[in-house]
Amino acid sequence: MKNLITALRSKPLASLVIASIGLVCTLQAQAQVLAHAQVSSSLNTLPVLTVAAAAPLNFAWVRADGKTTANLDNQALHSVKAANQGEYFWFNYQGKDYLLRDQATLERLAQIWQNVEQLNKQAAGQGADSDKQNSKNAAEVNEQIEKLAKTIESKNKKVDRLNYKLNTAIESEKESLNGQLRELNASLQSLNLEMAKLKANLTASSAPDANKNATELAKQIEQASQHAHSATRALIQESLASGSAKLAAK
């Protein structure tokens, strides 16, 4: 044992032992890396079907009554409708067309887009009510303008008659006539100012609150539409992964 310890204390042999230990550690580390790489490689070979958020989402959901929710231009949508009948969900993925007709998928689409459709109906009703109210307001203002115009016309005729009398009146009558003219002119000035206000109200927005509500509703529709598109992407991804999405017949 003493001879072995003495041998180990020699520098050449000590260096050899240390180098051997280092080589063993290195080989173990390399083996671990290789094993990990093999596992990662096997995982990467599994099929992964995803509908990337950045990719265009081309789809058309057509109901039995022809009502359509789609993310297609008019020409593409016309082509899809010409090739398919009834109720269906059509979408394009990686250049291939798929068609789903099962009731479960169609019911899920109805749930996904329900909020958007309700908000769109609300917006349409709000717009119709706003137009109706604006028309009613415009009719009332126009009626007021018409009456006011007749009053102004009548007073202008009085002014013309007084001016005529003033030109032919004697000196003692002029003071009274001038007083009447001042009253008429003051009244006309007030009536003309009222007329200007009525016309301004007619041309300006008569329902600022309605406009504010419409803007807020448009934001809600945009947010709901974004959520619906995301959910539709997830539905497409699920149908591709499960194999329920079938290639559309050409």
Image (cartoon, helix red, strand yellow):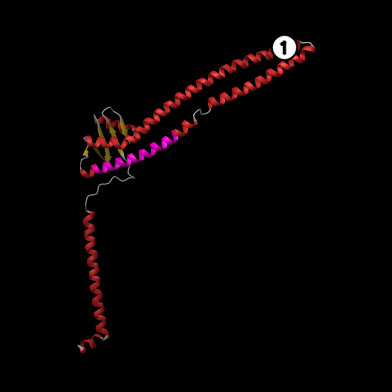
Q: Position of residue 35 (x, y in %)?
A: 21, 63
Q: Which residues are magenta?
A: 214-238
Compared with 249, 21 (above or below) is below
For this rendering, which residue is in front, 92 or 221? 221
Compared with 46, 16 (above or below) is below
Query: Residue 193: which quarter of the image?
Result: top right
Q: Position of residue 166 (x, y in %)?
A: 74, 13
Q: Position of residue 139 (x, y in %)?
A: 50, 20
Quick one: quadrant of the C terminus?
top left
Q: Reply yes or no: does residue 233 show up in magenta.
A: yes
Seen as rendered, the residue at the extreme right is 171
Residue at image point 69% right, 11% down: 161
Q: Reply yes or no: does residue 84 show up in magenta.
A: no
Disc 1 residue type (three-letter):
Tyr
Compared with 225, 127 (above or below) is above
Residue at image point 32% right, 32% down: 75
Residue 175 can be seen, yes or no: yes
For this rendering, which residue is in front, 6 or 196? 196
Residue that badge 1 annotates: 164
Please name the predominant secondary structure of the magenta segment in the image: helix
Residue at image point 75% right, 14% down: 176
Assess disc 1: are there few (<14), some (14-19) or many (≥20) residues with their C-alpha within 10 Å of its C-alpha.
few
Q: Is residue 186 left or right of residue 148?
A: right
For this rendering, which residue is in front, 188 or 59? 188
